[in-house]
Image (cartoon, helix red, strand yellow):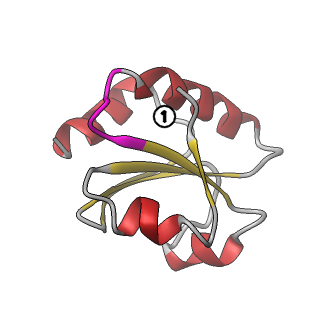
Amino acid sequence: MRLIELDKDNFDELVTDATCPVLVEFFSPGCGPCHALGALLEQMADAYPHMRFAAMDTVRFPDVAWAFDVAAAPTTLLFSGGRRVDAVTGYVPRSRIEEMLAAAK
């Protein structure tokens, strides 16, 4: 499943106002680890149909990234009930993402 592409116009609707947990990868287009993590998240999305998987381009929307204290890419944030509940920076293994998602069920 492809990650939902976030922008300033849809962020609140798809993340902060969401009724389900949302995992957001903040990425940079030229970042190798970002591409690898994005591919991993796309693979994982099908196994978690009750959650939303999305991506936010930090180059196009740096103000949104800074609003959530994202200073490096990739940074992955988990939102539940519209609030940030977990975060990791850098490429992390599948097991770490699974730990994040298990806490949001």
Q: Is residue 78 left or right of residue 55?
A: left
Q: Is residue 59 above or below residue 67?
A: above
Q: Note whether 43 is above or below 86 in the view shown.
A: above
Q: Residue furthest right?
A: 30
Residue 67 percent location from the top left of the image? 53, 79
x 42%, y 28%: residue? 45
Name the residue nearer the viewer: 4 or 40: 4
Write the residue at 59% across / 74% down. Answer: 64
Q: Residue at x 55, y 66 (%)?
A: 10
Task: Specify whether 41 is left or right of 100.
Answer: right
- Image location of residue 69, percent across then percent down: 51, 73
- Percent x, y of residue 75: 54, 52
Q: Which residues are magenta?
A: 47-52
- The residue tagged 1 is 92
The dominant secondary structure in magenta is: loop
Kind of residue indicated by mark 1: Val
- Residue 12 lies in magenta, yes or no? no
